[in-house]
Amino acid sequence: MRFARLRLNGFKSFVDPTDLVIADGLTGVVGPNGCGKSNLLEALRWVMGENRPTAMRGGGMEDVIFAGAATRSARNFAEVTLGMDNSERLAPAAFNGEESLDIIRRVTRDVGSAYKVNGKDVRARDVQMLFADASTGAHSPALVRQGQISELINAKPQKRRRVLEEAAGISGLYQRRHEAELKLKGAETNLTRVDDVLEQLA
Ligand code: ATP
């Protein structure tokens, strides 16, 4: 899968719909201080399922919505669309029938976040797993924000290991293992209950 397009609408300083084409190879974003370069990277993380307000330089999740300026009133929602090229058919099985994938995340004031993939409603988890399996995602070490290098140098070994695991594309497996363990626990509880009922009947 390859990032192909990014569309921002009401996201942070991008009040009007803004389309970016992400071409093959290295992409650089240049511009004066405060023009929104970091906001672009945050939009990319956000549409892939980032849920930590601190990672978005905000206090709450609705802080990504355009908050208004001297000549423009605040918006009621923020929406980011990430267009993925899947012509090499490398997306996880659930999405792999499609030539391209449009992932949309929208947050509306007092309503919360909703996600769609190619027009169909999906859960945050589905989007997070889609990118975790593709060895990228909101926490991908490929997205380097300011100050992150020194943070990594000073990080504890466990945190550095998580970065390596993310790069190796196995973080999705950890999530699945956790979910499988929860299911197993549920099944064991049910089994104990069945044993109790059988004992009472005997
Ligand atoms: P620098 O080069 O200084 O790091 P930058 O190009 O990365 O700057 P950003 O930090 O992405 O710029 O953008 C900051 C701008 O985004 C500020 O002008 C800030 O007011 C604006 N901004 C951030 N959140 C919102 C919001 N919710 N609504 C409106 N504007 C916002």
Image (cartoon, rainbow, N blue to C red):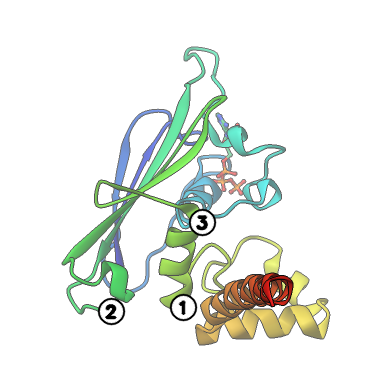
Q: Earlier in the sequence, mark 2 or mark 1?
A: 2
Q: Nearer the viewer, residue 58 or 133?
A: 133
Q: Tell whether label 1 touches label 3 (CB within 8 Å).
A: no
- Residue type at mark 2: give it: Leu
Q: CA separation, marks 3 and 1?
A: 13 Å
On the image, numbered disc 1 is attached to which residue? 135
Local SS, label 3: helix
Q: CA separation, marks 3 and 2?
A: 20 Å
Mark 1 C-beta to ligand 1 under 8 Å: no
Label 2: few (<14), some (14–19) or many (≥20) C-alpha neighbours in 10 Å: some
Residue 123 lies, with reference to residue 160, above or below; the image says above
* Quadrant containing ligand 1: top right
Label 1: few (<14), some (14–19) or many (≥20) C-alpha neighbours in 10 Å: many
Q: Choose top left, top right, bottom left or bottom right for residue 50.
A: bottom right
Q: Choose top left, top right, bottom left or bottom right for residue 167.
A: bottom right
Left or right of 49? Residue 191 is right
Residue at 52%, 73% in the rendered image: 142
On the image, numbered disc 3 is attached to which residue? 45
Local SS, label 1: loop
Q: Tell whether label 1 touches label 2 (CB within 8 Å).
A: no
Residue 198 lies, with reference to residue 63, above or below; the image says below
Q: Which mark is residue 90?
A: 2
